[in-house]
Amino acid sequence: MDKRMSKTEDKILQAADIIFLLYGYHGTTLQQIATKAGVNKAAIHYYFRSKENIYTLVFKNNLSILSEFLNTKDNWPNTKFKSSCFRAISKNINIAYNVWFIVNEIKVNNLIVKELIKTDEEINGLINSFFNDSSNLKIIERLITLQFKVIKSGFEKPYVAQMLMTNK
């Protein structure tokens, strides 16, 4: 998170990241975020003004993490993809839920995401960088495939998100 943010802002963003991951934009309420962050709803309105603003920051943060991950060539050694993918994910455990969140939000909330792409230059640039590089698309596709295997094995939500909910 941004070093200029207060501790309260940071707590709210961390809570929002988890809650939006679990419930998506439409299933998330500001009260859920406030409860998870240990603040009242007025604090969310004070720092972020609206659900849309906090969602935009969470979405952008997730895109940035995925972009950094995809652009770190050390993550992708020239070995079998499956083993290198698991090594890469173990280096940055957040990537498992970042991919899930981004893909799910693009699929389920595509009108909101389309509006963000139109109105936010940074989000537009990040999305375009993913889709203009075919190697990124292959990596994202394989990461999604791995997520679906985890879901089919019995998890309804990404395992990392379940861990975050129980550990925080």
Image (cartoon, rainbow, N blue to C red):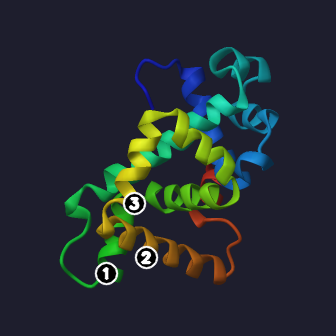
Q: Amino acid at mark 2?
A: Arg
Residue 30 located left or right of residue 15: right
Give neighbour class at mark 1: few <14, some 14-19, many 20+ (Cα, 10 Å).
Answer: few
- Mark 3 or 1: the one toward you: 3
Quadrant of the image occupied by residue 92:
bottom left
Kindly indicate whether the residue at mark 1 contacts the one at mark 2 (C-beta within 8 angstroms). Answer: yes
The secondary structure type at the circle numbered 1 is helix
Rendered residue at 21%/82% (across/down): 79
Residue 53 located left or right of residue 129: right
Q: Amino acid at mark 1?
A: Phe
Along the line of sight, the residue nearer the viewer: 86 or 60? 60
The secondary structure type at the circle numbered 3 is helix
Give neighbour class at mark 3: few <14, some 14-19, many 20+ (Cα, 10 Å).
Answer: few
What residue is disc 2 on? 142
Rendered residue at 32%/69% (across/down): 134
What residue is disc 1 on? 81
For this orientation, the residue located farthest to the top is 46
- State the image coordinates of residue 152 (x, y, percent, origin top left): 65, 83
Along the line of sight, the residue nearer the viewer: 75 or 163? 75
In the rendered image, the quadrant that contains the C terminus is top right
Rendered residue at 81%/33% (across/down): 31
Rendered residue at 73%/36% (across/down): 33
Q: Earlier in the sequence, mark 3 or mark 1?
A: 1
What residue is disc 3 on? 131
State whether residue 112 is above or below residue 38.
Answer: below
Q: Earlier in the sequence, mark 2 or mark 1?
A: 1
Q: Marks 2 and 1, Cα distance to the nearest angstrom?
A: 9 Å
Q: Which mark is residue 112?
A: none
Q: Amino acid at mark 3?
A: Phe
The secondary structure type at the circle numbered 2 is helix
State whether residue 36 is above or below residue 132.
Answer: above
